[in-house]
Amino acid sequence: MDYTTIIANLTESKFLISMTPIEKIVEIGFTSGMNSTSTILDLCCGYGEMLKIWNQAFGCRGVGVDICPEFINEGNIRLQQEQIQNVKLIEHDVLTWESDELYDYVCLSGEDFGGFENTITLLEKYAKPNGKLIIGTRFSKTECPPAELIDFEGETLSLLAINAIIRNHGYFITSMASDTDAEWERYIMWSARRHLDKLRNNPDDNEYKNWCDKWYDIYFRIRRQFEGYVTLVIEKL
């Protein structure tokens, strides 16, 4: 067994804040037509891992924006280490960030800022007239998700409902990549290690401890059964 490759893949994946596997992110880049002339804007980019993947796979130029300094600082260090010069990460609130440039692809993963329709509206601001939107989003595996899941996570639409919104805005889904149990577990345990670090630094924060207890309970009792995650590429008719 090639343990070196396994460890290298694990190192890469720990910076991917998504439940979509790396190979599927490459796949939707390929099927959506990414190439060396493509420009990509990734809002709430995290460590900029998706931009890094698409740059290395297709030579795309990218800009990532995220409000979290930890993500941006670590992401920029990784880009420098791998001598990637045409991906830029910016620390800024995506809701107040402005750009004069329009992009071939505009992405947002894991956030919705007031609902799926608002996500489409936000991304359209930065897309070229024939640009494609890439949206990573949670979804309900049932048409009637448990009320407790909605109370905890906010709006949780089915894929059928998500597709209806996309079609109402004049788009078609042209590429999609679903989650796997392994990717969910990777993401949940990444979050758990962050929770543990925070509690170690603030051992008397009982409110945060109680929130963590609820977070684990919701995941093991409800989210594994009723919630999925999908990355969609959508294009205008």
Image (cartoon, grey):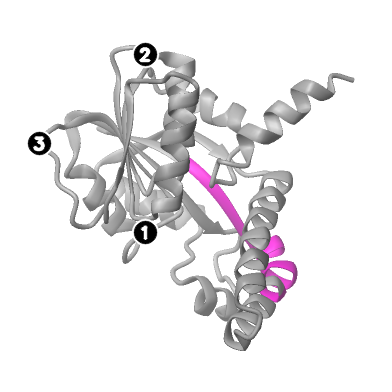
SS label for mark 1? loop
Of labels 3 and 2, earlier in sequence is 2
Q: Which residue is mark 2?
A: 35
Q: Is residue 16 left or right of residue 102?
A: right
Residue 27 is tagged as: none
Of labels 2 and 1, earlier in sequence is 2
Q: Is any atom of residue 43 visible in this view?
A: yes
Percent across and percent down for residue 228 are 60, 54
Q: Is residue 194 left or right of residue 172?
A: right
Percent across and percent down for residue 196 are 68, 66
Q: Is residue 4 magenta?
A: no
Q: Which residue is mark 1?
A: 112
Q: Nearer the viewer, mark 3 or mark 2?
A: 3
Q: Tell me if label 3 and label 2 are in contact, CB under 8 Å.
A: no
Q: Quadrant of the N terminus?
A: top right
Give 79 or 139, whichever is nearer the viewer: 79
Magenta portion: prevailing SS class: helix
Mark 2 belongs to which amino acid? Asn
Q: Where are the magenta residues, as a range? A: 217-231
Place residue 14 in its image quadrant: top right
Q: Is the residue marked by circle 1 packed among few (<14), some (14-19), or many (20+) residues within 10 Å?
A: some
SS label for mark 3? loop
Mark 1 belongs to which amino acid? Asp
